[in-house]
Image (spheres, rainbow, N blue to C red):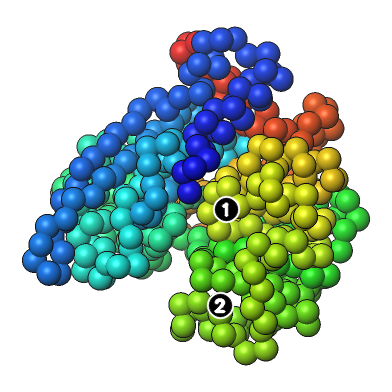
Amino acid sequence: MESYNSFRVAQQQVKEAARLLHLDQPTIDLLQWPQREFSFTLHAKLDSGKTRIYHAYRIQYNYARGPAKGGIRFHPDETIDTIRALASWMTWKTAVVDLPLGGGKGGVCCDPKTLSERELETLSREYIRATAEFIGVDKDVPAPDVYTNPQTMAWMMDEYETIMHRHHPGVLTDKPQQIGGTEGRRDATARGGVITVREACLLHGLDPTRAYAIQGFGNAGQRAALLHQELLGGGRLIAVSDSRGAIYNAEGFDPKELVTHKLRTGSVLNFPGSTIIPRESLLELDVEVLYPAALENSITQQNADAIKARIVCELSNGPTTPEADLVLYKKGIHVIPDILASAGGVTVSYFEMVQDNYSYFWEEELVHARLDKKLAKAYHTVQEAIKEKQVHPRLAAMVVAVARVAQACKLRGWV
Ligand code: GLU
C-alpha cells in the first residue's frame, strides 16, 4: 500500500487548496502537519500463551473546529504516514460537511484475519489502555474503520469506562445500539454516498437506474449495493470485487443475495450466475456509477484513462491518486471525492455523540432526514466551489474544507 506515500499526497492537496485561498505561510505550515501524534508499542497475549508486540498509532490532526474524530483500523500495512494521511482527510471530511469536529485517525499494525475473537478483544483493550488519557468526548472520539466494527467499539468503550470509573458512551461512536449506539450508523457511509449520487444525477441529467459497479465489498460496499437500488429507484449491479477477486454479470446481481453470500463464505467469488473477471477490469466497465470502496490508491495514472463510468463516488478514503484526478477531470468524469462522498459515516457518528451527551435517542427517520440534509447541502456547496474556482471536484472540496479550518485557526489566534 505504501509504495505511494499517502501523507505526501495529503500534504500536496492541502498546499494546492491553500494556494487558491491565498493563505499565509504559517497557516499552510500548520495545516500540513498533525497537531498531535502518538505511537505506542502494545503487547498482547495470544491464545498460544505467547506474547506478541504490535505497533499502534493515534493521530489528532487538527482540533480547531472541535474534538478530533476518526476511525481506528486494524491492518498489517499501516504506518505512521498512512495514519497521518487518513487523519488529515478526516479533518477535511468533517469540515466539508460542516460538523463541529476536527480530524483524527488511529491504527494497529496487525493482521486481524489471523487473530481469534479473544485475541482481537485483548488487542482492542490494550489499545485503549495506551490511549485512554489522550482520547475523550471533548478531546478525540474514535470509531471503526477497516477491519474494526461495533463489537470492537464495545470492548474499547468498556475498557475506557473501566479505567475512568464512570459512563462515557460518547468516547467512541458506531457502538452497538444497546450500549449507546444510534439508529442509522451502520449504513451511514454508503447512504451518504448514494445521496450525493442522487444529487449529481439530478444536477447533471444522469441516469442512476443504469448499471453500477462496486470495488471492495466490506461494510460500505455491501450497503451501497443495497441502497443504490433502494434510494435511486433501480440500477443493475453488474460487478463487484473484494480482496480475493472480482465477479461480473451483465444482467445484474441481486444485491441482497450477494451480501448474504459474502457474509456466509467470506468472499464474493463463486456467487451463482457470476463470471470471474480480472480485478482491474471492474474499473473499466461501462457503468453510470462506479463506487470505489476498497483501500487507498486504487485509481492511478495507469488505469484512470480506461475508466468509463459517468460518476465515480468514492466511498473509501484516498482511492484516487492526484495524477489520476487530472485524467478523470479531463475525461469529464464526475468524481464525488472521498471527503464528501464518504462523509455520511462521520456525520451520523456526530449524531451519535450528540444523542449520547443528552442520553436521548432519535428515531431512524430523523437520523436519515438529518443526514440527507447535511450531505445534499455539502454536495451543492462543493459544486459551487467547482464553478467558482474552475478546478476538479477534489480540489474544490478541499478549498471549502481548508477555508473553514483555516478560519477556525485564525479566530483562535493560532496563526
Ligand atoms: N472510519 C470512518 C471514516 O473514515 C468513520 C469515522 C467516524 O465516524 O469517526 O469516515
**Amino acid beneath label 2:** Val
Q: Which quarter of the figure has residue 52?
A: bottom left
Measured as percent of width and height from the top left, residue 257 is found at 60, 85
Q: Which residue is mark 1?
A: 316
Q: Is residue 221 visible?
A: no
For the residue marked with disc 1, what is the amino acid? Ser
Whether residue 28 sits left or right of residue 169 in the image: it is right
Q: Residue at x 29, y 34 (%)?
A: 38
Instruction: Give x and y (percent) for residue 109.
Output: 32, 50
Closer to the camera in the image, 13 or 301: 301
> Horizontally, is 5 left or right of 195 in the view?
left
Mark 2, Cα crowd under 10 Å, few <14 / some 14-19 / many 20+, is: many
Q: Which mark is residue 268?
A: 2
Residue 349 or residue 29, whichever sits in front: 29
Q: Residue at x 62, y 37 (%)?
A: 96
Residue 132 at x, y = what percent?
A: 23, 42
In the orientation shown, which residue stands out farthest toward the bottom? 272
- Position of residue 53 relative to residue 402, above or below, is below
- SS at circle 1: loop
Pick out the residue farthest to the right.
Answer: 205
- Between discs 1 and 2, the one toward the N terminus: 2
How would you rate the neighbour count of disc 1 (Cα within 10 Å): few for under 14, some for 14-19, many for 20 or more?
A: many
Relative to 4, does residue 199 appear above or below in the rendering? below
**Looking at the picture, does residue 177 appear above or below residue 62?**
below
* Residue in the foreground of this view, choosing between 308 and 183: 308
Residue 25 shows up from this direction: yes
